[in-house]
Image: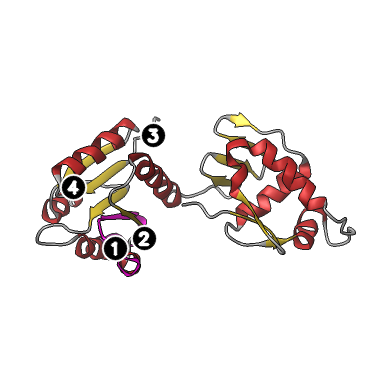
Amino acid sequence: MATLPAHILVVEDEADVRELLVIHLKREGYTVSAFENAEESLDALKKVKFDVAVLDWMLPQMTGLDLCKILRTKFGPKLPIMILTARADTMDKVLGLEIGADDYLTKPFEPREFVARIRALLRRSQPNPSNELTYHELRLNLETKKSFIGAHELALTPNEYKLLAELLKKPGVTFDRETLIELIQGPNVAVVDRTIDTTILGLRKKLGQYSEVIETVRGFGYRLKEAP
């Protein structure tokens, strides 16, 4: 059975911005329902199941933050929510996230970034099979020990695969060399200086466009950059 495209809810009172969002989302193959105020979107939510909600902060009558509160109460964490706003103050961003938004994008923004963030929200909301680790288009299958970027299979060595798997399990966490040696080779193997550095170098070459997701933390070790 074919998988239905994700259905995106857009609530934006500026017609030109709303049209721009719809064009780029549809270009990516998504189904889009767009409204100019919160009240119309609430009526639609009674009839349609949406996969992501995109809400402008400064809506007429009911604000995007008020709508966000309602959606979070009604749907819990199941519905990813993005807030769009011209307010660039850090405290405004904190407020939006604390109220329940999953992402916050400041106007003006690049349509490509907007679409990339929508993809990220969809990935986070979808159950991840226990035998697979993912980071954007990068995938590691823990059962078959195969790794891919999109449809392209990577020719990783066993140590490169193990190291990447450990980093993917904990994005943002810094691992020192000794910990990584123990994780990929076992606790009874003598630590060889620079072994992990050499493995990282080979891994970065094979990751190509994703080489920069492995960050060097000077004086400590390595970590996987947290996905946006």
Read off the residue under disc 4.
47
Q: From the image, tell me which residue sits under label 2.
A: 77
Is 227 displayed left or right of 175 in the figure?
A: left
Position of 149 relative to 186 (above/below): above
* Nearer to me, 167 or 140: 167
CA separation in Å, label 2 and label 4: 19 Å
* Gap in angstroms between the C-alphas marked 4 and 1: 17 Å
Residue 88 drawn in magenta: yes
Q: Earlier in the sequence, mark 4 or mark 1?
A: 4
At horizontal 14% and vertical 43% (from top left) the residue drawn is: 15
Q: Residue 3 carries which label?
A: 3
Magenta highlight range: 74-92
Mark 2 or mark 4, earlier in chain: 4
Do the CB atoms of the residues marked 2 and 3 lie less than 8 Å apart? Answer: no
* Magenta residue check for 108: no
Within 10 Å of disc 1 (Cα), the crowding (few <14, some 14-19, many 20+) is some
Percent position of residue 10, x then y:
23, 47
Upstream in the sequence, badge 1 or badge 3?
Answer: 3
Quadrant including the N terminus: top left
**Disc 2 element:** helix
Q: Does dot 3 land on a helix, a strand or a loop?
A: loop
Of the image marks 2 and 3, the number of the one nearer the N terminus: 3
Residue kind at label 4, given as amino acid type = Lys
Viewer can see residue 116: yes
